Image: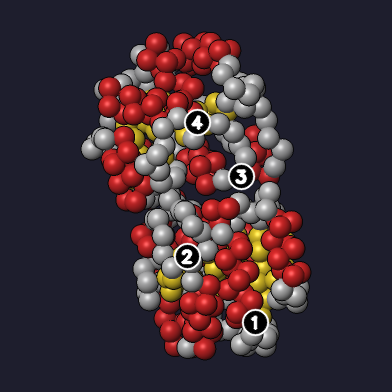
Amino acid sequence: MHIISNFKIGGAQKLLLDLINNSNKSLFDVSVISLYNKTNNSLANEFEKADCPIYYLNKKSGFDINIELQLVNLLRKIRPDVVHTHMAGLKYSIIPLLFCKVKLKCNTEHTIIKENYTNIEAWVKKFAYKYFNVKPVGISNCVSESIKKVYKVSDIKTIYNGINVEKYTHDGERIIDEKNIKLINVATFLPDKNHEFLIESIKILAEKINNFKLYLIGDGKLRNEIQKKIDYYDLGQHVILLGFRNDVNELLVKSDMFLMTSKHEGFGLVLVEAMAAGLPIVATEIGGIPEVVINNQNGLLVSCDKPRLFADAIEKLINEKSKYKTISSNNLLRAKKFDIQNTILEYEKLYLEVE
């Protein structure tokens, strides 16, 4: 049984969808609980098509005792051997899990845990990991180290997120059309994704190179603010906001280079998607990104507060054709390390530890 906050579009939800769609049906009967009600987006629609029962608990804002009661009733009804929680799933399910004596409990941490993380959820996790035999899983070594440091636990498993590599396959050798260079970024418009830094870098790049376009894929609360910055710098001919798209894999395959400017990133699943499409990458050197992108082998990594260096790195990959081709070839190979089948096998090994 999986318990997750909701089916909004995000890395945790994508991982869960892949887990339930690719699980070994001869070994596992899978069910999913969403704490909140149905979400209206393409990813939520994919969950509805999944071959497993899904339960929506319609959680109200704030503390909702009804959630605890519903979880107890479902746990008693389904009697799962393993419960895997994501996002706020553990916070709301720990008491029902203990009350119903679930044999194996694990929780995936999808982000780096901050040292000043002292809210109720942090205390729940600390006790769950140390005293209630909940197994923590980090999506990168960086995330696992933060779990160890903040929650003072040592028995942590690292399982990298994965993708269906074949979905992003690019045929043939990548060659940049210097008359029409296509850069791409896929990220929600939130502070941590650092779009403002990206636009500053593109402003600098536009002073040296003219025939390129940057396509921004995604939506979020800062979208209008970023659009204003694009207009202020008169970058409309270079930066195009495409909003949320269902065809990200096709857009990546048609692009020439992937850019990521995050200030905080536990793993960066979209980096693997870009690799699988054979795209060289320019990214910020923070969090779990260096575990995915090896500097000078899979792309170029730059400090997240140096827009000029970021622009220089983009220009370098455009101008140095041999380096561009080498990195593209390297990325096609490295993406296979993060194939979803490897992720699923690691999680299934964990589930089979149930006594």
Q: Which residue type carries mark 4?
A: Ala
Quarter that holds the C terminus: top left
Foreground residue among 267 and 225: 225
Nearest to N terminus: mark 3 or mark 2? 3
Q: Which residue type carries mark 2?
A: Cys
Give the CA separation, mark 3 to mark 4: 15 Å
Q: Which residue is mark 3?
A: 9
Give the CA separation, mark 4 to mark 1: 42 Å
Give the CA separation, mark 2 to mark 4: 29 Å
Q: Which residue type carries mark 1?
A: Ala
Taking the image as shown, residue 23 lies to the left or right of residue 194, namely: left
User: Which one is in front in this view, the residue at disc 2 or the one at disc 4?
Assistant: 2
Q: Which residue reaches farthest left?
A: 154
Instruction: Name which residue lies at 36% across and 60% down.
Output: 291
Foreground residue among 58 and 347: 58
Taking the image as shown, residue 107 lies to the left or right of residue 210, namely: left
Nearest to N terminus: mark 3 or mark 1? 3
Checking the image for residue 88, the label placed there is 4
Q: Which residue type carries mark 3?
A: Ile
Q: Which residue is mark 1?
A: 206
Instruction: Check disc 4 and report its element: helix, strand or loop.
Output: loop
Checking the image for residue 304, the label placed there is 2
Nearest to N terminus: mark 2 or mark 1? 1
Q: Position of residue 20 (x, y in %)?
A: 50, 37
Locate residue 43: give its quadrant: top right
Query: Dot 3: within a 10 Å radius of its alpha carbon, few (fewer than 14), some, or many (20 or more) residues?
Result: some
Q: Is residue 101 above or below residue 305?
A: above
